[in-house]
Image: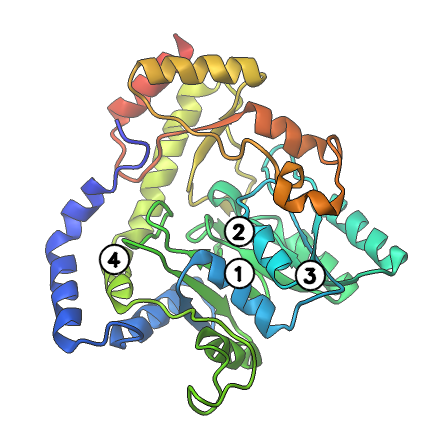
Amino acid sequence: MQFIDLGKQQSLIKDAIDTRIQTVLAHGKYIMGPEIKEMETQLAEYAGTKYCVSCSSGTDALLMPLLAWDIGPGDAVFTTPFTFIATAEVIQLLGATPVFVDIDPLTYNIDPDLLDVAISKVVEAGELKPKVIIPVDLFGLPADFPAIKSIAQKYDIKILEDAAQGFGGEINGKIAGSFGDAASTSFFPAKPLGCYGDGGAIFTDDDDLYEKLLSVRVHGKGGDKYDNIRIGINGRMDTLQAAIILEKFTLFPNEIKLRNQAAAKYNELLAESVVTPQTPAGYTSAWAQYSVLAKDAQERQAIQAKLKDAGIPSAVYYPKPLHQQTAFAHLNYQDGDFPISEEMSQRIFSLPMYPYIPEADIERICDVIKG
């Protein structure tokens, strides 16, 4: 059994993907070819945003808006410690200061009440200027953007939605990727909408930001590539990856439905054995991961061992919150500063999840956990 099996999906569209690839090979525009704009147009329409700007990875999709907003030393950027390092890495790369905020124990997303407190403390201290909030749509579930937007307006700061795992999720019919001043997603192969390499995209309705992103994506170019008006990056996406996304996107809306059906089956079968994930009313998750909670680290270890013995893979996202990692030691956070993130990191584990997972596999996984 595989944790994520991409083979079934590929079998459904292999001929179309092969045709797309051959088209790219024929026209020879391997970087920023016509498929790039075609993909950007389709994804912006799906997300309900004015613009989509593709880029070379989900990490660059986070970095580019921060560059465009001139985030740097002396700026505070607020995010969760319970996420992949890329979310906070981009803040630190620019010399800004990550300010971590603990998570809601039910959704694992940033806690808006604690976010308000954290921003207020930074304002009162007066050493850093609050500039951006980066909420993470963890495991595919959008963060509490109605509350976060209210907080951002209160302090006049921007929202950069980290939808690397969340693209395809919804709040009351509004698609993840459309909730911030900008939103970033990833096309890493394991993501709900993934390519066969690295890739990413940024979504926005902001005309000025859009123009800056186009510049940042190509080394900060102005009128031409030798007229550089700002510092940027080499953030262009390969045309072959856009061609693959275009064909995979034909399946994507239905795959979100299939992921939700799989999650519902897991929830039904595991309700009495582990703490199953909760989806608030009005929300839809993209189910990038299906993650449950054991009672403690010992029970998690025991369950994972049983699964391994049965040939069933599992994973832990995330075993160590960012504030406890060496890369952020200079921030001087201590164990116990973010108790919910720390507790979840000891209890959480993820089970196989992909749109075409057989129901029989789900039943077998759950039988092993309950056995």
The residues tagged by marks 1 and 4 sit, at their Cα atoms, a distance apart of: 26 Å
Q: Is residue 2 visible?
A: yes
Residue tagged by mark 3? 96
Q: Is residue 136 above or below residue 132?
A: above
Which numbered disc, 2 or 3, marks the residue that appears first in the sequence? Answer: 2
> Which residue is drawn at the image coordinates 40% and 68% (left, top)?
54
Element carrying mark 2: helix
The quarter of the image holding the C terminus is top left
Q: Is residue 273 visible?
A: no
The one of 115 and 153 positioned closer to us in this rendering: 115
Element carrying mark 4: loop
| Residue 36 falls left or right of residue 155 | left
Classify mark 2: residues with Cα within 10 Å, few (<14), some (14-19) or many (20+).
some
Residue tagged by mark 1? 62
> Which residue is drawn at the image coordinates 67% and 31% (left, top)?
340
Observer-side mark, 3 or 4, equals 3
Amino acid, disc 2: Ala
Which numbered disc, 2 or 4, marks the residue that appears first in the sequence? Answer: 2
Element carrying mark 1: helix
The residues tagged by marks 1 and 2 sit, at their Cα atoms, a distance apart of: 8 Å
